[in-house]
Image (tube, helix red, strand yellow):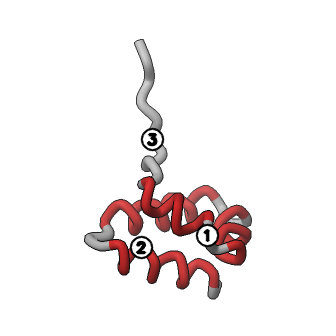
Amino acid sequence: MKQQSEEPAMSMSFCYTLGGNARALEKFGAMTEEEKRQVLEAARSARSKEEIRSLVRDVAEL
């Protein structure tokens, strides 16, 4: 039986947007697992592409 991961799945929109912002990608990669989990939860809760873009900009500015 396949065990479901407790990690939130990355949305395709978040992955695409994050991949297009080198600074945000670098900052995200340097985060702790807990910080990444929080960002991914925020991405999953986003209601629009603009909210995703805003989240990625926020990550880049950390």
Mark 1 residue element: loop
Give the label, 1 or 2, closer to the camera. 1
Dot placed on the residue nearer the N-terminal end, 1 or 2: 1
Residue at 70%, 72% in the rendered image = 22
Residue at 36%, 73% in the rendered image = 49
* Pointer 1 residue: 20
What is the number of the mark on residue 52? 2
Viewer-side residue, 39 vs 13: 13
Mark 3 neighbour class, 10 Å CA radius: few under 14, some 14 to 19, many 20 or more: few
Residue at 41%, 12% in the rendered image = 1
Mark 2 residue element: helix
From the top left corner, tell me how far across and down residue 29 is, in percent. Answer: 70, 62
Q: Label 1 sits on what residue type?
A: Gly
From the top left corner, tell me how far across and down residue 17 is, in percent. Answer: 52, 68
Q: Are marks 3 and 1 in contact (CB under 8 Å)?
A: no
Q: Are marks 3 and 2 in contact (CB under 8 Å)?
A: no
Q: Marks 3/1: CA distance? A: 26 Å
